[in-house]
Image: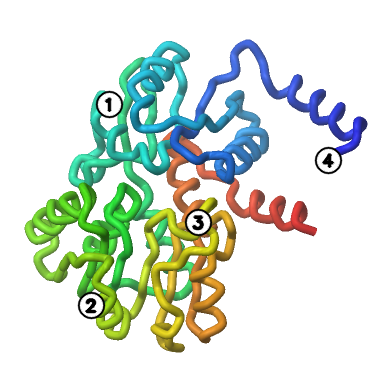
Amino acid sequence: MPGPGIRFRRMIEMEKRISGHTGLLALFGTPVGHSGSPAMYNFSFQHDGLDYAYMAFDVNVEQMPKAFETIKLLKMRGGNFTMPCKNIAAELVDQLSPAAEIIGACNVFVNDDGVITGHITDGVGFVKNLELNGFDVKGKKTVVLGAGGAATAIQVQLALDGAKEVKIFNPKDEFYQRAEGTKKKLAKHCPDCLVTIEDLEDKEKLAEAVGDCDIVINATIMGMKPYEDVTLIDKSLFRKDLVVADTVYNPEKTRMILEAEEAGCKAIGGVGMLQQQGAVNYELFVGKKMPLEEYQKFQAEQAK
């Protein structure tokens, strides 16, 4: 725990940064206590001299209508939605970007004079992070675990960016039906990409798909607190020419990522996705490029 001197200096810094005119942005979802978004956005606002503050609020699906009333009442500039609130958010905003409308989910909102627009940037941030790690999705066979908001955004972006196959694995729940809708939409918009849907409980089909793909992607909450010890892919399926990617960023390395590294796979955690997605979101919020390089240097210093 920081000493009294450090806490006092932080209070002084906060008093200097927060004013009666400070605009509010926030993250909504559950759980949010692990989120790196407040640190990233608040650093960027302070770096750029912008009078905004970003917070995180633990909100479930049932509470989202009230959350939207609060967003409008407080005239919040914008913010983000995380699991499990991305789909319900798309029903509550005033309008959706074209991509968000196709997907039926949004992870970003921007409030322009009382009109709230929902955007989806999960897929863009994820694919950009793959590219920065040397993986081009064009022509590749992909396996995506999950069919929620983030998973759907990634599936759509993979198809739009030229993936050869997108094999979706999800339990047979309401999200499975959503995946069937995604398949139909992609058949129309990306006819060159083969999209299939299988039950995540069918371990034989999952093993077959992983054995035949170029990259396997976890887009579920498995690996995140309180599921740190859970992985959906048996480590016996990993091989050195397989790329393994996760959307979970806290912990920075999930059990799946650690086991993939041990097997010699190229393993890509979720932190980079968060940062690349954050850069896109930041520009939507304030119309400026995010000082991502400076934030990464700041993180490195804090980790010492």
Q: CA distance from mark 1 to mark 4?
A: 40 Å
Residue 286 in view of the camera:
no
Mark linked to residue 144: none
Inspect the image, locate mark 3, and give the three-letter code of the amino acid beneath it.
Tyr
Inspect the image, locate mark 4, and give the three-letter code of the amino acid beneath it.
Met
Asked if the residues shown at circle 3 and circle 4 are in contact, with their CB atoms under 8 angstroms apart, the answer is no
> According to the image, what is the colour scheme of the structure?
rainbow
Residue at 57% x, 30% y: name it. 55
Residue at 22% x, 42% y: name it. 104
Report which residue position mark 2 lands on: 205
Q: Say whether disc 3 or disc 4 marks the residue closer to the N-terminus.
A: 4
Report which residue position mark 4 lands on: 1
Mark 1 nearby-residue class (10 Å; few <14, some 14–19, many ≥20): some
Report which residue position mark 3 lands on: 227
Q: CA distance from mark 2 to mark 4?
A: 49 Å
Q: Say whether disc 2 or disc 4 marks the residue closer to the N-terminus.
A: 4
Which quadrant of the rendered structure holds the N terminus?
top right
The residue tagged with tag 3: helix, strand or loop?
Answer: loop
Inspect the image, locate mark 1, and give the three-letter code of the amino acid beneath it.
Leu
Where does residue 73 sit, x and y in percent of width and height? 42, 11
Q: Say whether disc 3 or disc 2 marks the residue closer to the N-terminus.
A: 2
Asked if the residues shown at circle 3 and circle 1 are in contact, with their CB atoms under 8 angstroms apart, the answer is no
Left or right of 26 on screen, residue 200:
left
Mark linked to residue 92: 1
Where does residue 68 sit, x and y in percent of width and height? 37, 21
The residue tagged with tag 4: helix, strand or loop?
Answer: loop
Left or right of 131 on screen, residue 56:
right
Residue at 53% x, 51% y: name it. 226
